[in-house]
Amino acid sequence: MNYVSWAALYEGATDRAYFEVLLPKIMEEIVLVDGICSSIIPDTPSVLLTRSTINDVAEEAFSARDAFKIVFIHADTGGRLLEGGMEMRSCAYCTAMYLKFKFPLVRCVAISPRHETEAWILADPDAVTSALGYSGSAESLELPITATAAERLVDPKQVLERALKIVRGRHRAVNVQQVFSAIAQRQSVDSLRRAESFRLFEVNLRAALADLGCIK
């Protein structure tokens, strides 16, 4: 039995609402399909790291080092031109943890949607309309209809906000965290796999799970 405890560092509260549903969902699907042993994937992280300086994050992770086997580092890329910088930033956290307490680099997994988290949220338009309780088409909300199109958006956050205003009205308060969580619950992993940045994330996640002996 392999208990895959995990830790996470998120950009913000709305990102957390999305990823804390999506991450265990993806891990469960991977070990269900390709698992070579019985694995338990917790629904929530055992450690929620506080966004701070690289050294402070490494110190916090060190203090909780026995509580997790995988750590996820979230950093939106801001687009292709900034991806290199964001990758280096994520790697800096991983490297700091390795230097501090030899945490395996392969088990430090970057979450880097192109531009913003909303690029992955919009990757499955059916999940978005379902979560919003909207019976019309994604096109009528001016949403991208493919994951590739979602990644090409310069400002996916603005596109999602516009759709929310169309459905809920401009003067009705929207709990964005609830919306993000509801979309993650409904998303098809196959739809997400059509996004290039998600495919790269899954490759790295699979390497981490393989290092733990969960999959080959």
Image (tube, rainbow, N blue to C red):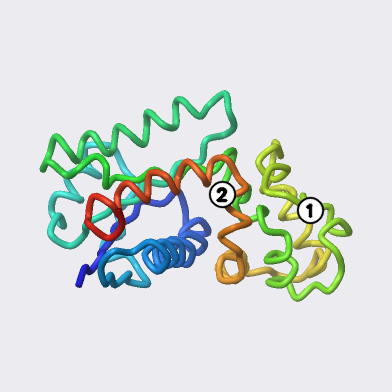
Left or right of 165 on screen, residue 17: left
> Which amino acid, mark 2?
Thr
Residue 153 position, x and y percent, is 71, 39
State the SS at label 1.
loop
Looking at this view, is 142 or 216 the one in front?
216
Looking at this view, is 209 or 136 the one in front?
209
**How many callouts does the rendering have?**
2
Q: Residue at x 73, y 65 (%)?
A: 126
Residue 141 position, x and y percent, is 84, 58
Q: Which residue is mark 1?
A: 143
Q: Residue at x 85, y 64 (%)?
A: 137
- In the rendered image, the vertical position of residue 82 relative to residue 13, given as above or below: above
- In the rendered image, the vertical position of residue 1 relative to residue 47, given as above or below: below
Rate crowding at label 2 as few (under 14), some (14 to 19) or many (20 or more) other CA atoms within 10 Å: many
Residues under labels 1 and 2: Cα distance? 15 Å
- In the rendered image, the vertical position of residue 177 relative to residue 7, given as above or below: below
Q: Residue at x 29, y 32 (%)?
A: 92
Q: Which residue is mark 2?
A: 117
The disc, 1 or 2, on the residue closer to the chain's N-terminal end is: 2
